[in-house]
Image (tube, rainbow, N blue to C red):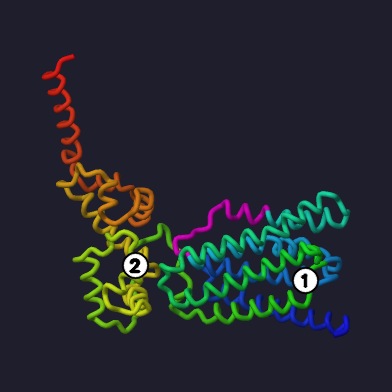
Amino acid sequence: MTASTTAALDLFLRGGVVSLLVLLAGRLLAEHGRVTAARLGALFAVGSAAYALCSLPGLHAQAGVWAGPLMALATANSYVFWLLACSLFDDAFRPRAWHGLGWLALAALGVVQGLVLVPGHRPEAALLGLVLDLQPLVWAGLAAWQAMATAAADLVEPRRRLRLFIVAAAALHSVLTALATRAGAGSATTGDGGGLWDAAGLLAISGVITLALLRVGGGHALFAADCAPVPTTPPAPEPAPVDPAWVTALERAMRLDRAYRRDGLTIGQLAVDLGLPEYRLRRLINQGLGHRNFNAFLNHYRLAEAKAALADPAQAEVPILTIALDAGFGSLGPFNRAFKADTGQTPGDFRRQMLPAPALVEPSKSAVGAVSASRISNPA
């Protein structure tokens, strides 16, 4: 192809990318605007559109006053992708102030590099350009880790199908872009990089993501509604055909056999115990019982046992760590976090509230009496 044909095709493909991404951002905000994952998805779509424009050769010098905002959005977009992965694949994720500060820092560095250092050919531009060109690798790696770390426990079928494509495709694009930039294509935020392959890749990725996210139905199966604190008690389940025999078998395994106490229990092992295909058990727990995550499903029973033990006067002297381990938690830290998310209290505060004062005071008095008696019978 001639240079003019290639440039025209490049422009056409980038126009398709920008149109798809603007459509995606608008629909996500209109239909799911109160959900963190949808807002981050819209920001990622806008940032990807900005990247498609910034990496178009020759546009940087003609952007005028829009150059700064476009470069800010494009530079920090890999960071937004990581936040999007966290919000999509971790129902307990909530944006914090430092997340916003991180975005502002990257956006500011992109503007400084594109508008101050590069035009003046300052020596600092090379070092800053290296940092900005390679930072997508870091965020892509963190996003991939986030997706893989929570994949086994995910019970939401649309999310399970989508996570591999989004992470693999977007991470691959980030890696290829960074490697191409280091090989001599230039920084994406300066308008010297890009190319036909870049535009085609962006179009393919944005097209699939657009179709996938726009298919999110009224049940919001892909997105978890924001709430604070994060409850471990499941919401009302969506109507789904559930075999009562499966429900009975699952309840027997959890309430009578206390399968949740088993160390390292996976959904595959539980499916084998019940004699069910794993995909049917996932559907039963998610669509029939309303849980989005297998670990949250187990914690629902673990916390119920722990709360009963903490409120039992007969177990007033049992250490909280022992109660946590007996209920199936691996250590005290995860137990404390899950307990506070469920009740808004620490286990110690919950026990003091549920037990009468004598149940907590008497053990310490008896211990003091034993020590005193020991000292009398064995004087120094």
Q: Residue at x 86, y 51 (%)?
A: 122
4, above or below 327, in the image: below
Residue 182 in the image, given as x and y percentages of width and height: 77, 62
Secondary structure type for disc 1: loop
Residue 62: numbered disc: none
Q: Quadrant of the N terminus?
A: bottom right
Label 2: how many Cα within 10 Å (few below 14, some 14–19, many 20+):
some
Q: Amino acid at mark 2?
A: Pro
Is residue 31 toward the left or the right of residue 264 in the image?
right
Residue 315 in the image, given as x and y percentages of width and height: 18, 46
Quadrant of residue 370 in the image? top left
Q: Quadrant of the C terminus?
A: top left
Is residue 287 toward the left or the right of residue 161 in the image?
left
Is residue 257 toward the left or the right of residue 9 in the image?
left
Quadrant of residue 130 in the image? bottom right
Q: Residue at x 53, y 54 (%)?
A: 96
Q: Residue at x 25, y 43 (%)?
A: 319
Q: CA distance from mark 2 to mark 1?
A: 46 Å
Q: Amino acid at mark 1?
A: Gly
If you read the primary sequence from the N terminus, does the residue marked by circle 2 or circle 1 appear first?
1
Q: Residue 169 in magenta?
A: no
Secondary structure type for disc 2: loop
Q: Nearer the viewer, residue 46 or 267?
A: 267
Mark 1 — residue?
Answer: 194
Q: Residue at x 79, y 68 (%)?
A: 193
**Magenta span of residues:** 90-105
Q: Residue furthest top?
A: 380
Label 1: how many Cα within 10 Å (few below 14, some 14–19, many 20+):
many
Residue 312 in the image, given as x and y percentages of width and height: 18, 50
Mark 2 — residue?
Answer: 234
Q: Nearer the viewer, residue 152 or 82?
A: 152
